[in-house]
Image: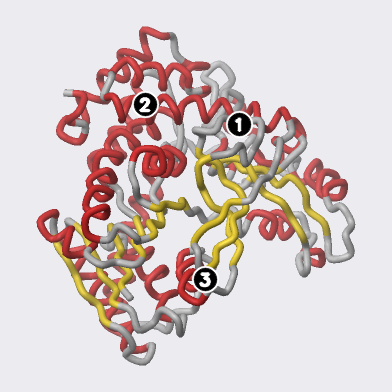
Amino acid sequence: MKITMMGAGSTVFARNVIGDCMCSEALRDSEFALYDIDAERLRESGTILEAMRRAKGGYGRITTYLGVEKRKDALRNADFVVNAIQVGLYDPCTIIDFEVPKKYGLRQTIADTLGIGGIMRALRTIPVMEDFARDMEEVCPDALFLNYTNPMAMLTGYMLRYTGVKTVGLCHSVQVCSRDLLTQLGMEDRLEGRKELIAGINHMAWLLSIRDKEGNDLYPEIKRRAAEKIMEPDYWNKVRLDYIRNFGYYCTESSEHNAEYNMFYIKSRYPELIQRYNIPLDEYPRRCVNQIEGWKKEYAQIMESGIQQHERSTEYASHIMEAVVTGKPYEIGGNVLNTGFLISNLPQEACVEVPCLVNGDGVHPCRVGALPVQCAAMNMTNINVQLLTIEAARTRRLDHVYQAAMMDPHTGSELDIDSIRAMVDELIEAHGAWLPAFH
């Protein structure tokens, strides 16, 4: 069996996903093919994963493939392909995504999923992933593509609509959503045996129901405690608790993400909201700098003291592969097309996040039915942007880029149309060769 990692220079992530595979008896004898276009990062990943492989008993083998000319070889005969690329990296593209909008008075927190930053990230990433898809259709047509790269709904939606590659999008947020909520609210005693339903779109899927092992509805107590918790000055997760107050349901992704997915919290006319909700503006650039510095130190320590044993994480990837290989069913929250109206009040071409059963026949999405109307409405404000961005990438029409930015709830609530168009033009110019389709 062959498991290929695209963007293997994302060393910490590659270590988690490939390390998880090494923890599985069904997967550990695989060839783990590492692909990247950055020689140094690929070398670091190869060194660490080879040391981990030996520490785990020496099963399987590590191979490395550097550069576009080796991409088909990395993919050839793969059974599973894991995608974790970042096109344009922190420097220059993430910096551009933050600094240019800031000139127009548009502030962001993460800028990797929605907003003008998410739009730009999608437009520079989709052509690369389309190249991956064409290679896969030729050299590993039956492989399952596991996408971890953001913006999740735009990239996964494009792959499913416009390529022949079997694709599912994976995020970290579904499997920790209710656990973290109950823990933060001091309800740890209700964790064991709880039953829940989560559905919506990536980063804005809704905890629609949650019951304890006796079947008791936990939402009344969650709402009572959330109303108290949100009043604590230093509490960091206030936006999502405010969702409970205003929309009746908690959502999957963090408050720093969700602060920029709507028109409510980051508003130049109401600067006091930033402090009231503890919104970390420019969070992702700070995070990138810290991660880069942290990784340099961690790599030096690993080289000095040796690899530490890896414990299997909560990432879905290895469990999906294991379920396909062994036929033993496993349930995930996956990102798939809304084909057949899995969520009946969202459009079929939308990429939705719903419960999926994985077995020897692959990934099988489950029908959820209708979301509460207010939750579907919130999702649609994001889906509008996602579909227009996909259309822009597909047609290479600049007017669709403008329209996606205009329809973005945060951008449209802060800027006038002429400013939005000027900002888009400046972003495209600044990205240069990273957006060749629009030059």
| Residue behind mark 2 | 391
Residue at position x 28%, y 77% in the image: 31
Q: Is residue 251 left or right of residue 152?
A: right
Q: Mark 1: give few (<14), some (14-19) or many (20+) Cα within 10 Å.
A: many
Query: Label for residue 71?
Result: none
Quadrant position of the C terminus in the picture: top left
Residue 279 appears at what percent x and percent y? 56, 37
Residue at position x 77%, y 36% in the image: 248
Give SS at disc 3.
helix
Label whose residue precedes the other's in the sequence (2 or 3):
3
Q: Which residue is more in the foreground, 283 or 61? A: 61
Q: Is residue 65 left or right of residue 211?
A: left
Residue 337 appears at what percent x and percent y? 50, 41
Residue at position x 51%, y 34% in the image: 350
- What amino acid does circle 1 point to? Leu
How is the protein colored in the picture?
A: secondary structure
In the depicted structure, whether residue 347 falls above or below residue 290: above
Q: Is residue 311 left or right of residue 122?
A: right
| Residue behind mark 1 | 346
What separation in Å lies between label 3 and label 1 (alpha carbons)? 29 Å
* The image quarter in which residue 199 lies: top right
| Residue behind mark 3 | 323
In the depicted structure, whether residue 323 falls above or below residue 377: below
Q: Mark 3: give few (<14), some (14-19) or many (20+) Cα within 10 Å.
A: many
Residue 396 appears at what percent x and percent y? 26, 24
Quadrant position of the N terminus in the picture: bottom left
Residue 74 appears at what percent x and percent y? 21, 64
Q: Is residue 145 left or right of residue 188?
A: left
